[in-house]
Amino acid sequence: MDSVLKDENDMKFNADRAIYEDRKIKKFRFFDALFRRSVGFSSVLFVIVIAGIFLTLLIQSLPSISEFGFTYYTNSVWNPVENEFGSLPFLVGTVATSFLALLITIPFSLAVSIFLGEYFRKGAFSNILRNTIELLGGIPSVIYGFWGLFFLVPIMRDFEKWVGVTPFGIGIFTTSILLFIMIIPYSASIGREVITMVPSILKEAAYALGSTRYEVVKGVILPYAKSGIFAGILLALGRALGETMAVTMVIGNRNALPTSIFSPANTMASVIANEFTEATGDIYVSSLIQIGLLLFIVTTIINILGKKIIKKFSKV
Amino acid sequence: MSLLRTRKIKDSFFKGLVALFAFLSTIPLLLILSYIAKEGITSVNWDFLVNLPKPVGETGGGIANAIIGTFFLIIIASVIAIPLGIGIGIYLSEFRKHKFAYYVRLGVDILQGTPSIVIGMIAYLWIVRQMGTFSALSGGMALSIMMLPIIVTTTEETLKLLPDSLKESAFALGVPYYSTVLRIILPAALNGIVTGIVLSIARIAGETAPLLFTAFGSPFMNFDVTQPISSLPHVIFTYSTSPYNEFHSLAWGASLILIILVLILNISAKLLAKRWKINF
């Protein structure tokens, strides 16, 4: 009798418990699904935004693309009054400033990478240098531009007088100097990383053969790390191409084909910054958006390529 | 013997060259910081911090609206970017083998390299054109797009570092999946995520290009998200390119404050990372 009662109680208890557990599991399932959905939804939204950026730029530049076709890239006249838009001066301005800056950057960022990645990996020296370079990367672009305008431009003016060209002070060369300072941190930090990743067994083998440190750097480290260093320079180039504020402030904003490396010019980014809010007329706005589209495509390709090389390098 | 000597000379010459170029690279920072400190310190005082700008010709005036505006824009951007970024980071680390994760990672890579001016353009086309006016909201949205890649990657990287045993123990105790992630994994990764957020704020605090066509700037104090708003970087740009000396000194002061703000953010991110031993 007793035991039957106990069993009945147990059964009731178990039934209650089953209902309770069932509810709890349903609640868990619901929140699990909600959680998965919301995390998935944010990611889908993110991809949609990026696809949307590309599509918006493409659709908005269609009027200009259909109006000018390929001459848009070969015409050197940018005349909003006559509705004639050729972007060649800006392409030349962008390429000239970026590559000149890159050329000056290479020895400096290479030196910093070798210094931090090989000679002084730890210690006070290395800390000071590394933090300084990182802070350099943190300074806002507009402050570089402001400093460039008041500190660098007068110096460049004197320099141009000394060289014997028209002393504008502003222009392609000044911009390149400013850009070179701004992109050191990008290429140097990646360069340091890849140089640190060179296997010590290779270096030790070279030392064991009697190599000097210079020979190890030249014969082992640089050949091994060259793809990674190249990727760092590529990513720095991507930065330089899209850099806006500092460039806008010191390039001189002249919409004609530059004649020398000292002449005032405009880059793709700086012409957008200067004219986008003032642009009137659909074709004018569309032409500016087409510059934005080109800038987006080029920096995307450069960036993905650079990232791919680095990923491949880290896997080896 | 002479060959050995030339090799040794070459070696020390190279070492000297590397050290020389490496230290030359630090000179620009010293020049910029000292120049801005010298020019900026004279214009920064209490009035400068709490007053609104005065019209051309009157001396004095401050940049209170720009300081408040910068913080306002950072808050708008953070409210959008932080939850979204952490969500995407969780997706990438929890569902890393999904096919779609590849496209999300590709998106992060693309966005990291997209010039800020292009993002400003997009925010203009998407929001300003639809609303018909420049607004703090559009500026905040543009900045939030720039914050996302940093928050996503730092969240993903920190979550990936956590040991699987943490999750397995939670599962073994019957903890449902969502509370495992929200109450065990996320708190364990909090330090890395916070560092990422601070870094991303440091990055956008000085951005000007995305604000040119969105927040636009305003001489007044503004707390309305649908109205144009001023910000420190924007004030520096407009004042420094104006022809008036009073405006230049305001811009130097604003530069000093902005640089201090960005340095504080960067250094605190660094200290946090060091304290919590995170390496991105």
Image (cartoon, coloured by chain):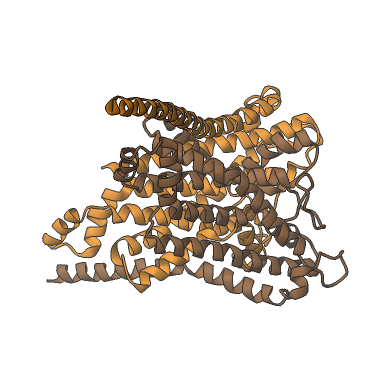
Chain colours: A orange, B brown
Q: For the N terminus of chain A, which image quadrant?
A: top left
Residue B257 lies, in percent from the top left, at 65, 67
Residue extending furthest top? A66
Quadrant in which the C terminus of chain A is drawn: top left
**Image quadrant assignment for residue A42:** top right
| Residue name at image x 41 percent, y 56 percent | A189
**Residue drawn at 73 percent across, 41 percent down:** A276
The image shows residue B276, relative to residue A68, as above or below, that is: below
Give the x, y percent position of residue A242. 57, 45
Left or right: residue A136 compared with residue B134? left
From where the camera sits, is residue B248 visible?
Answer: yes
Q: A263 or A251, which is in the foreground? A: A251
Q: Nearer the viewer, residue A306 or A223?
A: A306
Residue A79, horizontal then vertical, whole percent? 76, 37
Kindly indicate the quadrant of the structure image that contains residue A77. top right
The residue positioned 64% from the left and 36% from the top of the image is: A291
Left or right, residue A303 beside residue A216: right
Quadrant for residue A208, please give it: bottom left
